[in-house]
Image (tube, rainbow, N blue to C red):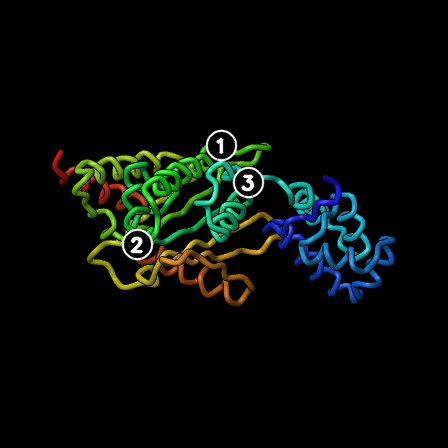
């Protein structure tokens, strides 16, 4: 349907924000940009507000108008325009995927590095199916059983990003710091769940793009005690975004100064954690101490 309005997806919002930033830096009003493109000002406004479609060729023309001719920038923004309306791989999972989760999955699909610290649980990208169901059921206070299973399947499908990606994009690099307390969780309904989960963590450390560290129970205090934090990095020119999670969902932190606080916090968490080799030994020791 050619007259159907564009949905303001996360990719469209990021593209619109970047075009606005570069137009402003060039000292142009939106009316002048629209006139240069032969558009009505309302059309240009819809593009910046993520409510209008724009082709890669039009983006390239806009960037030239704004004096942004760096090939890396042009490629990044034209690719974003090309993918702006792409249907997310998660769509078959339906309404169980909240808006904030959809946005995060779209961010993750475009990212090159994800740094995550979790004080009380194993990060989603490293969870087994059994562990995922246990955690989702415990924290999804209003979820029905079928929704729990759907979200657990979605979480496992999401993990494919660590081994393969479409379009020749390299697998996502993951750097996870996990508090030791999360490694000792038990389950009445799934007595072997944690042993399988720890075995899976050890297997994941064999991947060259996955780094796992453990915060020792006897270690020093660090920002990693506060809550789940995901620092998501992208290829240039896209800025880093931070995702913070709680029982009601998640929200993003953007802006150079605000993001830097969390980047510094993650660096402190890494410094307080066991080395990669010692973390493997810790995980194996806990696993071996569990009943078989």
Q: Which mark is residue 273?
A: 2
Q: SS at mark 1?
A: loop
Q: Is 178 located above or below residue 192 in the figure?
A: below
Of 246 and 279, which appears nearest the observer?
246
Q: Position of residue 127 (x, y in %)?
A: 33, 41
| Marks 3 and 1 in Cβ contact (< 8 Å) | no
Q: Is 69 located above or below residue 165 in the figure?
A: below
Looking at the rendered image, the disc whose residue lies closer to the viewer, 2 or 3, is 3
Of 73 and 35, which appears nearest the observer?
35
| Crowding at mark 1 (Cα within 10 Å: few <14, some 14-19, many 20+) | few
Instruction: Give the quarter of the image for residue 273.
Output: bottom left
Looking at the rendered image, the disc whose residue lies closer to the viewer, 3 or 1, is 3
CA separation in Å, label 1 and label 2: 29 Å
| Marks 2 and 3 in Cβ contact (< 8 Å) | no
CA separation in Å, label 2 and label 3: 35 Å
Q: Residue at x 47, y 59 (%)?
A: 251
The residue that mark 1 highlights is 164
CA separation in Å, label 3 and label 1: 16 Å
Q: Which mark is residue 88?
A: 3
């Amino acid at each position: 349907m050619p007259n159907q309005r564009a949905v303001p997806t996360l990719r469209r919002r990021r593209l619109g924000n970047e075009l606005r930033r570069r137009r402003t830096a060039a000292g142009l009003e939106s009316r002048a940009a629209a006139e240069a493109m032969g558009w009505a000002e309302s059309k240009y406004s819809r593009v910046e507000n993520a409510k209008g479609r724009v082709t890669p060729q039009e983006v390239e023309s806009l960037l030239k108008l704004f004096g942004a001719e760096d090939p890396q920038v042009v490629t990044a923004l034209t690719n974003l325009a090309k993918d702006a309306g792409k249907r997310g791989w998660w769509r078959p999972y339906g309404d169980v995927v909240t808006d904030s989760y959809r946005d995060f999955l779209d961010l993750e699909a475009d990212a090159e590095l994800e740094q995550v610290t979790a004080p009380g649980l194993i990060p989603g990208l490293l969870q087994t199916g059994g562990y995922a169901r246990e955690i989702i059921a415990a924290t999804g206070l209003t979820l029905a059983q079928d929704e729990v299973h759907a979200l657990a399947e979605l979480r496992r499908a999401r993990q494919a990003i660590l081994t393969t990606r479409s379009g020749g994009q390299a697998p996502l690099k993951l750097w996870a710091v996990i508090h030791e307390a999360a490694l000792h969780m038990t389950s009445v309904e799934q007595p072997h769940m944690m042993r399988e989960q720890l075995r899976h963590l050890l297997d994941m450390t064999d991947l060259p793009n996955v780094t796992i560290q453990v915060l020792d129970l006897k270690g020093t205090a660090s920002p990693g005690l506060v809550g789940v934090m995901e620092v998501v990095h992208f290829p240039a020119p896209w800025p880093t975004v931070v995702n913070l999670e709680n029982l009601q969902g998640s929200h993003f932190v953007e802006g150079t100064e605000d993001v830097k606080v969390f980047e510094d916090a993650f660096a402190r968490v890494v410094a307080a954690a066991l080395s990669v080799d010692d973390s493997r030994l810790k995980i194996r020791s806990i696993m071996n101490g569990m009943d078989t």
